[in-house]
Image (cartoon, rainbow, N blue to C red):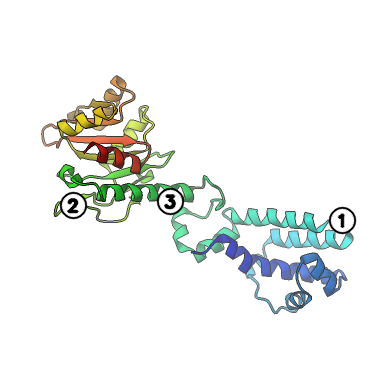
Amino acid sequence: MRFIEEVVVEEFLPTFRSMLAEALRERGLTQSEVAELLGISQSAVSKYVHGEVARNERLLTDERLVDLVERLGHGLTEGEMSPVQALVETEVVIRQLEQGDVLAQLHQEAVPELASYGGAFEVHDPDSDVRVAEQALASVRRGLTVVENTADFARYIPAVGTNLVEALPDAGGIEDVVAVPGRIIELKGRPEVPAEPEFGVSEYVASVLLTAREHGSDARAAVNVRYDPTLLDALEAAGHSAIEFDAEKGIESAIPAALEREPDADVLYQTGGFGIEPVIYVLGPDAPTVAERLRDAL
């Protein structure tokens, strides 16, 4: 695990400080004066000025950093800028370079897994795509833990398998839905999760969830299990609203029709049809919640 702050400390600061130390020395300041302005030792200034510190070539030639050093060098030397203002100006540039720019690129090189999210995101943004996506993945993992530890869950896994899915807040398609690759199956009387959850690997359960969301449901997660009248009764007894849809009509038309009859339904079910296995879908705000709702009804 490597934080972008480490990139700032190890790549940006040595380059920036050496550039600024050079600029200040060229303007006639002594090593002592430079050390005081930068808040570092005189020996550190000497190393910066004499090129004894490794510098990042991409940062060294970045026009924004070159311009920043020029402005700070002039302002600090002429007394037109205080050290506090210089600090603030530098922080602004650092934040700019972290937002899908050179520091973000260096961070991505240090953490290759970030490449799948692209470089144009603000790593400190609490609503960044990376954070939201990772939270959804973590949520499904927690939900799967509930599934794996629910007694008798395997009995309700349909022949087509079960999946536990969770959509991103602004999901537009199955690529925005986290699910289990290959679905959850029954193995020796226990639910078997074949792989870590991923985006875009569920077609049917994700489509049910997305269709429900498109027609008024605020659910972000869903799980499917074998249809059983007793289980359906238990879900309704727990306060959930269930509505049947016609599986033979297809989810694109059947689910909207069902939700039109019962807009608040959080349990959707169909009792089968020609070549169609009867299934119950439990909807909810997140994967752990729908898994717990099902566990409590079993």
x and y percent of residue 211 in the render? Answer: 32, 33
Is residue 100 found left or right of 182 in the rendered image?
Answer: right
Task: Please tell me how crowded label 3 is: few (under 14), some (14-19), or many (20+) other residues with Cα within 10 Å.
Answer: few
x and y percent of residue 294 in the render? Answer: 26, 39
Q: Which residue is drawn at 83% across and 56% down?
A: 82
- The amino acid pointed to by label 2 is Arg
Badge 3 marks a residue whose secondary structure is helix
Badge 2 marks a residue whose secondary structure is strand
First of labels 1, 3 by sequence position: 1
Task: Please tell me how crowded label 1 is: few (under 14), some (14-19), or many (20+) other residues with Cα within 10 Å.
Answer: few
Task: Check residue 134 in the rendering and tell me which mark sits there, or answer none.
Answer: 3
First of labels 2, 3 by sequence position: 3
x and y percent of residue 217 in the render? Answer: 36, 29
Q: Which of marks 2 and 3 is in front?
A: 2
- The amino acid pointed to by label 3 is Glu
Task: Please tell me how crowded label 2 is: few (under 14), some (14-19), or many (20+) other residues with Cα within 10 Å.
Answer: some
Q: Which of marks 1 and 3 is in front?
A: 3
Whether residue 254 is visible, yes or no, is no
Q: Are marks 2 and 1 in contact (CB under 8 Å)?
A: no
CA gap between label 1 and label 3 equals: 46 Å
Whether residue 261 is visible, yes or no, is yes
CA gap between label 2 and label 3 equals: 27 Å
Q: Give the answer, above or below, for where 155 lies relative to 117.
A: above
CA gap between label 2 and label 1 equals: 72 Å
| Residue carrying label 1 | 80
Task: Check residue 190 in the rendering and tell me which mark sits there, or answer none.
Answer: 2
